[in-house]
Image (cartoon, rainbow, N blue to C red):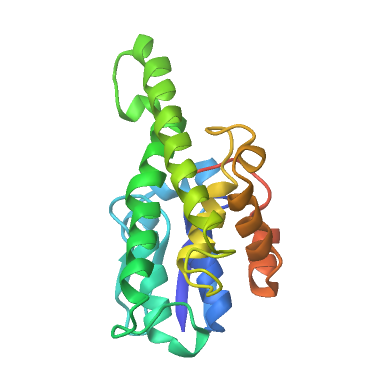
Amino acid sequence: MYTLYWSHNSASIAAHYCLEEAGAKYDAVLVDMGKEQHKQADFLKINPAGKLPAMKLPDGQIISECAAISLLIADRHPQSGLAPAVDDPARGPFLMWLFQLNNTLQPAMLRFYYPDRVTADAAGTAAVQAKAQEEIAALWGRIDAHLGKGGPFLLGDRFSAADPLCYMLSTWQDCCPDLYRRFPNVKRLAAAIRARPAIARVAELNEVGPVAA
């Protein structure tokens, strides 16, 4: 049994999607970031970084980082098809997209939502946000162009754990207004992901409240 620590519309949603897609047994423990429960002592014992998601494994180990959790779930539940096998030619592109989304696109988005994490100069936050928006739009443009060559998924017609992460990030649109209109292939991916029953079950829990990370 896994235990996922999550909050509405936080980065935990992609890991939550993967647990449902894998058919894994898990408990979901709400850590309300709107009430700053992630900064309280009880949660800091679970993840000293004070960030979500975090997941307790059946042996009691705690891991964090959305991409790491998603990959672990995929590898522990190969029947789910969430990740190509290590000797599959698609494994490299899968890892590339998973980590590009987690390590490049998401940090750019967080610079928009939390410019105060980048600069202590209140007068500089607008410039941080503007630069972040430029980068975000360029990244979505590259993803959209890739999806336009195949799709609907990042691995063509093959669903993987990278796609729920892509879908999650595509719903954070304050940093990239009219995203689905501007990037129709991303919209196509989002529609394909949201239509999956396992995704829909989790999405309904998360489609309230503010973005948090």
Query: Number of numbered discs present?
Result: 0
In-image side of 206 versus 57 (left or right):
right
Farthest residue, direction front = 149
Nearer-the-camera pick, 196 or 93: 93
Which residue appears at 49% of the width and 83% of the height?
81
Which residue appears at 31% of the width and 59% of the height?
45
Residue 99's place in the image compared with 4, above or below, is above
Nearer-the-camera pick, 137 or 48: 137
Please say whether residue 138 is visible from this viewpoint. Answer: yes
Residue 50's place in the image compared with 86, above or below, is above
Quarter of the C terminus within the rendering: top left
Nearer-the-camera pick, 170 or 55: 170
> Residue 33 appears at what percent x and percent y?
50, 46
Which residue appears at 43% of the width and 21% of the height?
130
Please say whether residue 6 is visible from this viewpoint. Answer: no
> Residue 146 appears at what percent x and percent y?
47, 54
> Residue 41 appears at what percent x and percent y?
35, 52
Q: Using the rendered view, name the quadrant where residue 183 is placed.
A: top right
Nearer-the-camera pick, 2 or 142: 142
In-image side of 19 versus 70 (left or right):
right
Residue 112's place in the image compared with 151, above or below, is above
> Residue 30 appears at what percent x and percent y?
54, 59
Farthest residue, direction top = 123
Which residue appears at 60% of the width and 47% of the height?
171
Farthest residue, direction bottom = 79
In-image side of 32 versus 184 (left or right):
left
